Image (cartoon, rainbow, N blue to C red):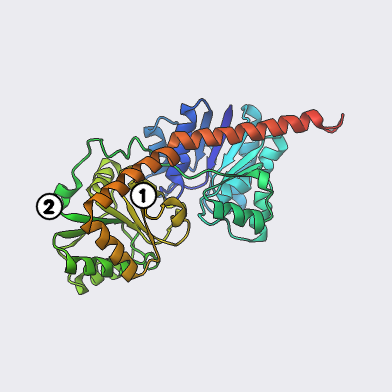
Amino acid sequence: MNVLHLFSNAKWTGPAEPALNLCVALRRVGVNADFACAPDAGASINKVVETARDRGIEPILQFRLSKHRHPIKDAQDRRALRRFLAERSYDLVHCHLDNDHAIAAECARSRGIPLVRSNYEGLGFSRDARRRRLLESASGVIEPSMPALLNDMQGLGLPRERLAMIPSAVDTERFDPCREVPDGRRWLGIPPDAFVVGIVARLQTHRHYEDFFEAVRRLADRQANVHAIVVGRGTKQQTVGLEPVKRLGLESVVHFPGFIDGENYVGVLKAFDVKVFLTPGSDGTCRAVREAMAMGKPAVVAHRGMLAEIVDDGLNGIVCDGSVEALAHALGRLAADRGYRRALARAAREKALSSYSLDVQARAVCALYERILAMQAGAHVNAPSGHV
């Protein structure tokens, strides 16, 4: 099976890693998955291209694949993609973002190639006429959650048989608590016996950092040796992070390592005792929660977006209403009861392996591909003579 994946963005953000990881995983289960992405990242390093090569995929770079619509560049891409599909033998085209979908829709249809679209919005696509027309060109839409599936079926009128709920995945081999990684606690000067609360999110006003810091303040007032790690950066770091921490007297408690990647990121996750996540960001599928679960870290999440579908309350983490009181109570319980925390940690790792691994996702996507191709073959067989 030969599948062309298109990704119209040069930034390493949102769905970039999930899209690339899916291609890597599909290759492991026998699918010839090619990955085309934007070649130009402006003055920045094109981390999408670099990471693809690091993970054994030589990306196709002969299209512009702009993130946003551009009449001239998109028209050039359509002409180039038509020629490319005529020269290659692809069974399917898999799109990940709106503009690569808009570029590919007519090209794939003219060649009789089914198109699959991934959805990275945790609660489903926005309900507008342009999005409806775009999705109508897809033979299959991969939904990250049941709420997203129901939204797109009911709100956009997409047929149920075209929708498949396949959770987003993470690399459970990379995010493995038993693996040797850099010591995040030693790097940040945190005692080995401290209770560490971690959060991974851009420092933006809508990410509820004010609630997080106030809950940490209340926890630190009740219990000694509490530390918090904030992984992320943003233009609002001063007002969203540094100023409230100083105002609350938490300068010795809260650590700001900024943006971290590679093995250092895994090492910092390993330093957590508990992961907090309060609202989805650019990745509506909340990949950072799955990464923490794979590391055997129970997550305390707010009932926002699709977070309550990722974390099972009381089984592998805690789901709360996101208020300061509820957050402080959940953290206090986990800090006080090490046995309970360890039970949730084991269950978090088990769910990551059974539901969120790349192998599980790749096999589910491969099954969707096969179903779409079988339906197409059946339609050709059953078509009246002269109308195939």
User: Which residue shows up at 22% across the image and 69% down it?
Assistant: 217
User: Which residue shows up at 24% across the image and 65% down it?
Assistant: 216
Q: Earlier in the sequence, mark 2 or mark 1?
A: 2
Measured as percent of width and height from the top left, residue 76 is found at: 61, 44
Measured as percent of width and height from the top left, residue 171 is found at: 38, 38
Between 91 and 168, the residue placed more toward the observer is 168
- 280 vs 104, left or right, is left
Tell me the mark number nearer the camera, choosing from 2 and 1. 1
User: Which residue shows up at 72% across the image and 38% down it?
Assistant: 110
Answer above or below: position of 88 versus 347: above
Q: Which quarter of the figure is the N terminus placed in?
A: top right
Type of amino acid under label 2: Pro
Type of amino acid under label 1: Asn
Q: Which residue bears the numbered disc 2?
A: 191
- The answer to whether any part of residue 191 appears in the image is yes
Between 319 and 380, the residue placed more toward the observer is 319
Location of residue 253 (image quadrant): bottom left
Determine whether the residue tagged by mark 2 lies in a helix, strand or loop. Answer: loop
Q: Which residue bears the numbered disc 1?
A: 316
- 8 vs 339, left or right, is right
Answer above or below: position of 268 versus 29: below
